[in-house]
Amino acid sequence: MFYPSYRGRRIRGREVFRRMVCETSFSVNDLIYPMFAAFGSGIRKEISSMPGIYQQSVENIVAEAREVYQLGIPAVILFGIPEFKDSVGSSACLETGVVQEAIRALKREVPGLAVITDVCMCEYTDHGHCGVIKDGDVDNDATLELLCKEALSHAEAGADMVAPSDMMDGRVRAIRETLDNNGFTYLPIMSYAVKYASGYYGPFREAAESTPQFGDRRSYQMDPANRLEAIREAAMDVNEGADILMVKPGLPYLDIVREVRNEFNLPLAVYNVSGEYSMVKAAARNGWIDEDRVVMETMTAFKRAGADLILTYHAKDVAALLLKGW
């Protein structure tokens, strides 16, 4: 009988050795928790397709943010549900806008927590698209002007980082120049550099009330079939001054995460998006999977693929599991 010279089970057979040779690990410092700030007061509305995630008015955002910070999670990213929407998303850059008010409240009440803001127009336009509409499509360059105003308003409110998610060409450079010209040279940009036109965003559109009222976003978000284009998009954002790159969604694009990791040496984030979260929650509620195991396996997969940071709705659960010694 042949006995191999290498037996993997010699190490795998004991838990202590498994820990010692583990190739991939992650910590609470890798997590960013998305939050939905809603205009008004006394609001805490659970999103039906995302159990445990809420649209919340500013006072409740602050209350949950304290919990987030106590768990050791270093940062949140804010999305806004404004008082009103119009064709050009004018509420996105108001000094008294819901995200701007949430930033100020968080920096006042939970100063140790980093506040990142999503910069896009889809939450603020009445048509649900990510910019100004001209001839039935988003006008790239006209939208850049609005994104710059929105990013600047977030910076002036006290944001620690801005994260443009719109996928307009040239938006990182435009925002970088606007921030620099207004004294915010220190403020970093986390670019949604590689963002696919994905079916996994469905629950988010309920959460952010941002479903397009006509057509889809394929003219500005990436084709899921394309790999080389991801490298071109990321390279463009590197050249324009991005400080952190992001790939979105996460699980269906782990190959892209690895490609971007291999190509660039900037910090890399991955967005574990709403559809990924909701599928896990639904399967767990039906008793089909062990939720804790699946969630932690997912986080490990992101890190193994090369991500430094993970934006995830599971962040609080992951942090609690890590505190228990998972």
Image (cartoon, helix red, strand yellow):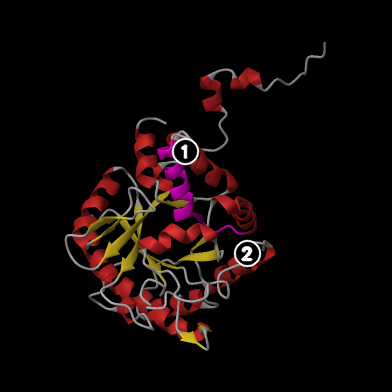
The amino acid at mark 2 is Ala
Q: Residue at x 64, y 20 (%)?
A: 9
Q: Quadrant of residue 318?
A: top left
**Residue 108 in view, yes or no:** no
The quarter in which the N terminus is drawn is top right
Point out residue 32 in the picture as x, y percentages from the top left corner.
39, 52
**Residue 276 in view, yes or no:** yes
The quarter in which the C terminus is drawn is top left
Residue situated furthest front in the rendering: 286
The magenta-colored residue range is: 264-286
The residue lying toward the viewer, choosing from 270 and 240, is 270
- Looking at the image, residue 46 lies above or below residue 178: above
Residue situated furthest left in the rendering: 42
Q: CA distance from mark 2 to mark 1?
A: 27 Å
Point out residue 234 in the picture as x, y percentages from the top left corner.
59, 66
Point out residue 299 in the picture as x, y percentages from the top left corner.
49, 43
Magenta span contains residue 134: no
Callout 2 crowding tier (Cα within 10 Å): few <14, some 14–19, many ≥20: many
The residue lying toward the viewer, choosing from 132 and 241, is 132
Callout 1 crowding tier (Cα within 10 Å): few <14, some 14–19, many ≥20: some
Q: Give the residue at mark 2.
A: 230
The amino acid at mark 1 is Met
Q: Residue at x 44, y 55 (%)?
A: 274
Point out residue 287 in the picture as x, y percentages from the top left corner.
44, 34
Asked whether, in this view, residue 299 is left or right of residue 13, the answer is left
The residue lying toward the viewer, choosing from 299 and 39, is 39
Q: Give the residue at mark 1.
A: 296
The local secondary structure at tag 2 comes to helix
The local secondary structure at tag 1 comes to helix
Callout count: 2
